[in-house]
Image (cartoon, grey):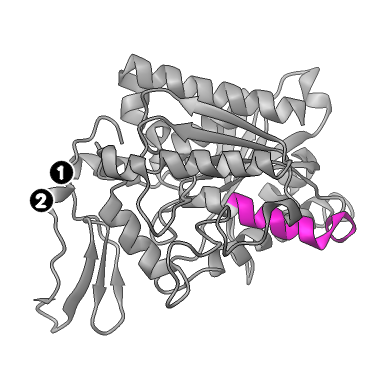
Amino acid sequence: MATIAAESQQHEHQANVVLPDGRKVVDEVSGWLRVFDDGSIDRTWTGPPEALPLMQPVEPYAVPRDGHTLHDLPGEGEPDLRVYLPELKAPAAAGRLPVIVQLHGGGFCISDPSWLMYHHFYARLACAVPAVVVTAQLPLAPEHRLPAQMDAGVDVLRRLRSIVTSDAAGTLEDPAAELLRQAADVSRVFLVGDSSGGNLVHHVAARVGEDGADVWAPLRVAGGVPIHPGFVRAARSRSELENTSDSVFFTLDMADKFLAMSLPEGATKDHPYTCPMGPNAPPLESVPLPPMLVAVAEKDLIRDTNLEYCDALRAAGKEVEVLINRGMSHSFYLNKFAVDMDPTTGERAQELIDAIKSFVARH
């Protein structure tokens, strides 16, 4: 992220390091993840310590803070949900709210939606739209390779629909589920995802569209918002070759390794999961997608393939809007410190929120 120096060069891959318990490190990703020879994974952060506060979990709270409440809904055999509910004053409180389903990034291998980096943005977004925001912890690779994350995204929608369509008040045991049932308008669901979560926006929306409206009624995916989606090709793009990362949160080495760990065995980055605009993917004309708002960071390493995706959607006759985050790098808006302290980053984050608010209002 923008204000954290790119110190990942100091935390290079340390294959063949042996721990006191006898386990051997066989792969490592930029301080984020270590893979051992027995197949176990350690996601303890070993990178620059100044990044650690952004990864601290935020506990739920039923007493309003900054205009919203935060609730956890554990699932038994279903995805665990985290729900942001904005406080509304009459007369706005008369109706149900649209639902933003956040699909978190992290290269399919790391990340938790309870982290401060997500919390500060999605709490703010819930109040600004206003909307119910639903997040979920997705399965992580390499333990769970794609399409496990896409399956989980569909399961999140199924659980959301099940809660909201419960027959009557009082039938839900969890008070937070009842609050969600009362507040959410599932006929206006918007999928929002950062980085690899942007890939999930595309593929989960496509799956729902392929099933057909009758299968999902009354739930309807009204739009998708991939933010700096992790769309790439096996061959480096010009922006990958010419741009430089200023963040420990996104480097080419990190992206390459995470995708090698998360794509199906033997697949390259030209796989449809990471290159839906490529020749190995179904023609976009045949993919049933809702209207899309795609955010592209001007200084992103994968800017060019993001723009290629947008061009391919237009060429396929899809409804797509593009927001360019001028002067910004990959997932800049998740860095709360930069958003709060740097005027330009704060302004760009507000532009992103305003664009999402406008998009939801028009769909």
Quarter of the figure with residue 185: top right
Residue 129 higher or lower than 32, as above or below? above
Dominant SS type (magenta): helix
**Crowdedness near tag 2: few (<14), some (14–19) or many (≥20) residues, C-alpha within 10 Å:** few
Residue 66 visible somewhere in the drawing: no
Expressed as whole percent of the image width and height from the top left, the position of residue 279 reads 57, 60
Identify the secondary structure beneath mark 2.
Answer: helix
Question: Does residue 206 sit above or below 323 in this rendering?
Answer: below
Amino acid type for the residue under numbered disc 2: Gln
Measure the C-alpha gap from mark 2 to mark 1.
6 Å
Q: Quadrant of residue 243?
A: top left
Amino acid type, residue under disc 1 in the picture: Glu
Which residue is at 58% across, 21% downward?
Answer: 354
Residue 203 image-quadrant placement: bottom right
**Position above or below: 297 against 241:** above
Q: Is residue 343 magenta?
A: no
Which quadrant does the N terminus fall into? top left
In terms of secondary structure, where does tag 1 sit?
Answer: loop
Q: Nearer the viewer, residue 314 or 331?
A: 314
Q: Is residue 126 visible?
A: yes
Question: Could you say which disc has been placed on residue 7 in the image?
Answer: 1
Q: Quadrant of the C terminus?
A: top right
Rendering coords of residue 31 (x, y %)? 21, 56
Q: Are marks 2 and 1 in contact (CB under 8 Å)?
A: yes
Identify the disc placed on residue 54: none
**Residue 10, numbered circle:** 2
Q: Which residues are magenta?
A: 201-216
